[in-house]
Image (cartoon, coloured by chain):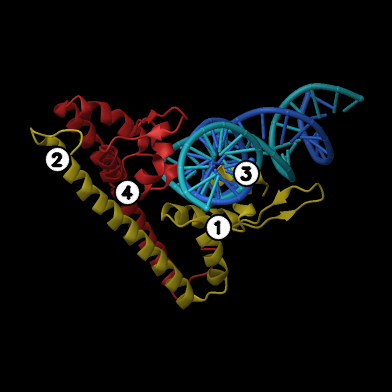
Chain colours: A yellow, B red, C blue, D cyan
DNA sequence: TCGGGACCTCACATCAATGGCAGCTCCTAG
DNA sequence: CTAGGAGCTGCCATTGATGTGAGGTCCCGA
């Protein structure tokens, strides 16, 4: 399969597929003209990449994770994913805290005697 | 007060203070040598800016908001802040959804018959 | 008068994923 | 044989707050 077909079948732009390769997330053989050739399994691979991105993993984290997955090193894969989950939790907590602070600002601003210097 | 002292007293880098000015968040007069001179109230202003950033407002949003605050236009200020709060809510919801998807990935990877192509 | 420190502006780098363009090669249908 | 479509590489832009550095001005103390 060539890059255009993979893009169509996986719903990802050609540009992104090349980017995934650049980031070490997706490999491709080359034909005699230098064009990328993908096996059938590349569709599933791209789907996995998209799922990971949707789960807010960075390409860097995914690049670290994929070799573990390929080696079927489940405990280490799990450990890494759980670390990512904690990062995500921390981010959610930070935003939740930001929301509290925003509510404080709203309260302050809503006070009738509020002035800019306060 | 000159920029170095304001930086020290507000705990913000000189670079950031100049950035705040560039974004229209903080104004300064200039002395004969072209150096910024700040009134005492600038310390409180910077603190307000930091609070807004901590509440995840962008400099753009804050630049829109500050004139309303200065005009003590409380209803419109509130409306803008509440819109920001909704944006924050949406962001939190997106990350929470990402966490769900990450949990799905963790589940998939943890299956004993998992292979990379799946 | 000289050195150094504080300040100035301008401008590029960072991080991430993607869009988009230029200029090239290559293959295939008409 | 030729036109066009698909692919290639390489590069710049985006967003936002900040770091960093070059090169220049200015002022004060020794």
Disc 1 target residue: A45
In this view, the residue in front, B74 or B104, is B74
* Label whose residue precedes the other's in the sequence (3 or 1): 3
Q: Which chain carries label 3?
A: A
Q: Which chain carries label 1?
A: A
Q: Are marks 3 and 2 on the same chain?
A: yes
CB-based contact (under 8 Å), mark 2 and mark 4: no
Left or right of A97 in this view: A84:
right
Left or right of B59 in this view: D14:
right
Circle nearer the viewer, 2 or 4: 4
Q: Position of residue B110 (x, y in %)?
A: 42, 72
* Label whose residue precedes the other's in the sequence (3 or 2): 3
Q: Can residue A100 be seen in this view?
A: yes
Q: Position of residue C9 (x, y in %)?
A: 53, 30
Q: Which residue lies furthest to the left in this view?
A: A112
Against A5, residue A60 (above or below) is below
Q: Is residue A14 visible?
A: no
Check disc 3 and report its element: helix, strand or loop: helix
Label 2 – label 1 distance at C-alpha? 51 Å
What is the number of the mark on residue B6?
A: none
Q: Where is residue A67 in the image (x, y as percent from the top left)?
A: 57, 69
Label 4 – label 3 distance at C-alpha? 59 Å
Label 4 – label 1 distance at C-alpha? 53 Å
Disc 2 target residue: A108
Disc 4 target residue: B9
Disc 3 target residue: A5
CB-based contact (under 8 Å), mark 3 and mark 2: no
In this view, the residue in front, A79 or D26, is D26
Q: Mark 4 lies on which chain?
A: B
């Amino acid at each position: 399969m060539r890059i255009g077909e993979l893009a169509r079948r996986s719903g990802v732009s050609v540009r992104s597929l090349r980017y995934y390769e650049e980031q070490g997330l997706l490999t491709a053989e080359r034909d005699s003209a230098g064009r990328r050739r993908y096996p059938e399994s590349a569709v599933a691979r791209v789907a996995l990449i998209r799922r990971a991105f949707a789960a807010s993993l960075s390409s860097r984290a995914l690049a670290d994770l994929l070799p573990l997955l390929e080696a079927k090193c489940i405990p280490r894969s799990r450990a890494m994913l759980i670390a990512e989950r904690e990062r995500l939790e921390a981010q959610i907590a930070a935003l939740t805290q930001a929301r509290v602070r925003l509510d404080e600002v709203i309260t302050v601003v809503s006070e009738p005697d509020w002035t800019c210097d306060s």
